[in-house]
Structure formats: C-alpha cells, structure tokens
Amino acid sequence: MTELPSRRLLLVHAHPDDESINNGVTMAKYAAEGAHVTLVTCTLGERGEVIPPELAHLSGAALGQHRLGELRAAMGALGVTDFRLLGGPGRFADSGMMGLPDNDDPGCFWQADVDEAAALLVEVIREVRPQVLVTYDPDGGYGHPDHIQAHRVAMRAAELAAEAGHGIARIYWNRVPRPAAEDAFARLGEELPGLPFDKAAGIDDVPGVVGDERIGVEIIADGTPYAAAKAAAMRAHATQIDVAEPYFALSNALAQPLFTTEYYEPVGASVPDGRATDLFAGTEEAS
C-alpha cells in the first residue's frame, strides 16, 4: 500500500460543481502543500439545469457523463487527483430540487438508506484515514435533498468509522459569515450595472450563512494562486456556472459573490477566540 501524506482531507459533496463553489480555494491550497485531498461526490447531477444554449440538449445520463467530465477538468485546475463517486458512477441518481416528483425515484440519493450509503463512505475513510472531514450542515446549506442527504451520510460514516477505530479528528461544515456576505453583496450592488448579469441574488441564496461567532476557520486566498484556481475550477463546470470574476451566477442568472476566503464551522468543538487558518490545527498528524 502506498504511504499517504501526513495530512489527509476528505470532502463530501452532493453534485459536481458543489466542491468548486464551496471549497475550491481550500482544495487547491492543501493539494499544493502536499496534503492528500480526497473528494467524494454522491451523484452526477444529472437533473441539473444547463446554462449554455449549445449544451441545452444534454439531460439525464448524458448530462451526468458530461458533468463527470467537467468534474475531471475542475479537479485538474485544483491539483486534486483523488476524486470519486460514492459507490461508483451512477450508484445514486440526482434527486432534483426539494418537493419535485424526482425525489420519489427509488434510485435517487434522497431515497438511499443512510447506513448503506454511509458504509460505502466508510470504505473510503478506512483507505484514506483522513484527519479532517468537510461537508454540509444539517440543512445541506440551502435545503436541497441531495445536500441534506450528503450531510446525513457523511456524519453517519464518521460515526461508523470511529466505532471501527478510524476516528476523524475534525469535522467542519461549510459556512459563510453574514458580515462577509453583506459586504460582498454591497460591492456587487455597486458593480452590477457593468456585469453580464441583470440582477443579483440575495444573501439568503448563499448556502450556509451564519453569524460570525460560529466561524472557526477561514482559508484565505487573496493574493495567492488559489483564487485563480478556484475560478478556473468553477469555469470548468460550464453547464452549471457562469463566472465573471469576482462574481458568478447559476442557472437562475442571479449574480452572487465568488468568495476567495472560505469559512468553516467546527462540529462538536468550541470555536476558538481567534479564527484559525488551518483545518488541521489541533489534529494528530500520524501517518
């Protein structure tokens, strides 16, 4: 078995593109520093809406395969080589937005047995032995069924892995502090007339916004190559994201900030008085 680097980070996401929007800076930084970065994506996002007119013909399995190619390109931009589909490609289908009939598809991720899906993730944890796990909060950031299920599966897998002697030292949820979001949207409002977007999203459209007091770690990319890497990774997901730095829009065509500082809430641990700048702070780094 190949010896792994001393620092090992696992991220669990619902669809291709979620990782680049939420954690592109973080993944690029740790990969460049020699940490082993593992991404597990739970679905291929085959029910996503397609932005470019020339790709509008893509749907279902064809869209899923295209988005897998976009994921490969995004990981190339971030320097991440270990990325996987939970249970293999096509094991779990995209569930669509909450409340749609797609949620009732027996093959969709929303309908998956949490313990069975978590067992698949435990296999990855046993192999990689991450000290740090990053995923969504219990609402999945914004209530999408696949994001909620990714949270449930990741947290359950962490429990099962710990019971088997493969405990994870730190678990974090993706967050954005409200003051940072307010400042970014204020700038967006001033610049919007000159952008290729007609309207702006609102702060409530940004997943995981919470008060400052819940933020334990921030990963800062301003003035580093990691900001450019994140933007390039987001551009790779062309079916889902329209990038006009320092902003982007999803299929709703509403502009929102492209955050080059990424924020995390520690789970089951007190928030330090001053924000840490390293997800591995306080972890055991045994190989």
Image: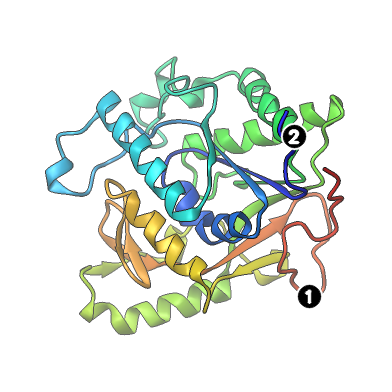
Residue at 81% x, 49% y is 268
Residue at screen point 54% across, 21% down:
87
- Residue plotted at (41% across, 29% down): 95
Disc 2 residue type (three-letter):
Ala
Quadrant in which residue 57 is drawn = top left
Amino acid found under the numbered disc labelled 1? Gly
Between residue 149 and residue 127, name the one nearer to us: 127
Give 276 or 203, whichever is nearer the viewer.
276
Residue 156 seen in the current view: no
Identify the image's colour scheme: rainbow, by chain, secondary structure or one colour.
rainbow
Task: Identify the element where label 1 is drawn.
Answer: loop
Left or right for 38, reference 214: left
Crowding at mark 2 (Cα within 10 Å: few <14, some 14-19, many 20+): many
Q: From the image, tell me which residue sits under label 1.
A: 274
Q: Is residue 11 left or right of residue 286?
A: left
Task: Kindly give the residue lying farthest to the left in the view shown.
Answer: 54
Q: Position of residue 7 (x, y in %)?
A: 74, 50
Identify the residue at image location x=42%, y=41%: 16
Locate residue 204, reporting x and y percent.
Answer: 46, 61
Q: Secondary structure at mark 2?
A: helix
Residue 158's label in the rendered image is: 2
Q: Residues within 10 Å of mark 1 (few under 14, many from 20)?
A: few
Give the side of residue 212 with respect to residue 13, left or right.
right
Q: Nearer the viewer, residue 149 or 37?
A: 37
Q: Quadrant of the C terminus?
A: top right
